[in-house]
Amino acid sequence: MFLTQTHSATLHATLRSPYTSFRSGHITRIMRKMARLAIFPNFAPLRSRKTSFIPDVNELKSLIRDDTKLIVINFPHNPTGATLQEKELKEIIDIARQKNIVVFSDEMYRFLEHDQANRTSSACDLYDSAISLFGMSKSFALAGLRIGWLTTKNSDLLKSFATYKDYTTICSSAPSEVLAIMALRAKDRILKRNLDLIENNLKVLDEFFAKHTKFFDWHKPKAGPIGFPTLKTNIDISDFCLDLVEKKGAMLLPSKVYDFKGNYFRICFARKNMQEPLEKLEEYLKENY
């Protein structure tokens, strides 16, 4: 395990070579920009099925090239809340193992599966050349600590991460590390609190979207406090979100932010007063449509 504040940068510096990206619907904005800057010139995104946001594993096989070095996955997924099945994850790992490809698995929303039966193994436990990313920001709701870690059985990669980190942050904040340890010791209590909040807010969202089927398609997430509904009107989702935040102070993120085509938007429900922003959204719909 390697403790770091610069997860993505560490990995990018270590694996500056062509790679295939596999993820549900989008790759992170940082990686997308890096691909366009030709750090990863053979970037190959795999688009998801629009209803489940889970891509076809068979398509991944068609994207693999002789010079493919890295497969990137992100489950539980941000922004859709989609999850893989254990069988699908193992299929991806088998593809990587056959070609000796490194797998980078972003697992920041791990432990926030709405049904524990949907929780998969951590990629680093299934494959020696897999790297798993986790931290305190999402599942523990402690983003301010800026503490996270990369876990891998590959000692060469681990050494590369450590070397890169020596030239960046060197070490994390000691008070943040202490607070992170305290939170990890209270893991069960904190996760239960967060899952209870998610469960309650999901009920509120289910009712809201059932009431407003004229405007929205609700693709109910399976993990995390995030969802990716569709706006059914002809209005561009970016214009809708901008007008909403300007008039009502309620913020939704349009799919354009994630380089994802379509009238989708990210809604976050990790708050105790979920009813309040939904009331603002409902007011906006009544006043403008």
Image: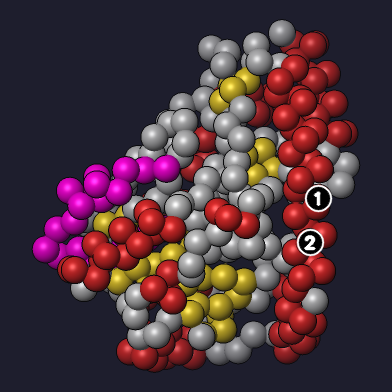
Please identify the quarter of the rendering in which residue 100 is found: bottom left
Relative side of 41 to 45, left or right: left
Q: Which mark is residue 197?
A: 1
In the picture, the quarter occupied by the C terminus is top right
Q: Position of residue 285 (x, y in %)?
A: 75, 15
Q: Nearer the viewer, residue 74 or 200?
A: 200
Task: Identify the secondary structure beneath mark 1.
Answer: helix
Q: Position of residue 232 (x, y in %)?
A: 57, 16
Which residue occupies 59% across, 45% down? 222
From which residue to which does the magenta span run? 54-73
Identify the amino acid type marked 2. Lys
Identify the amino acid type marked 1. Leu
Q: Which mark is residue 192?
A: 2
Q: Is residue 197 magenta?
A: no
Classify mark 2: residues with Cα within 10 Å, few (<14), some (14-19) or many (20+). few
Please identify the quarter of the rendering in which residue 89 is found: bottom left
Please identify the quarter of the rendering in which residue 92 is found: bottom left
Which residue occupies 18% across, 68% down? 99
Q: Position of residue 14 (x, y in %)?
A: 34, 78
Q: Residue furthest top?
A: 289
Q: Position of residue 241 (x, y in %)?
A: 65, 28
Establish if 145 lies above or below 196. Answer: below
Report if residue 143 is visible in the image. Answer: no
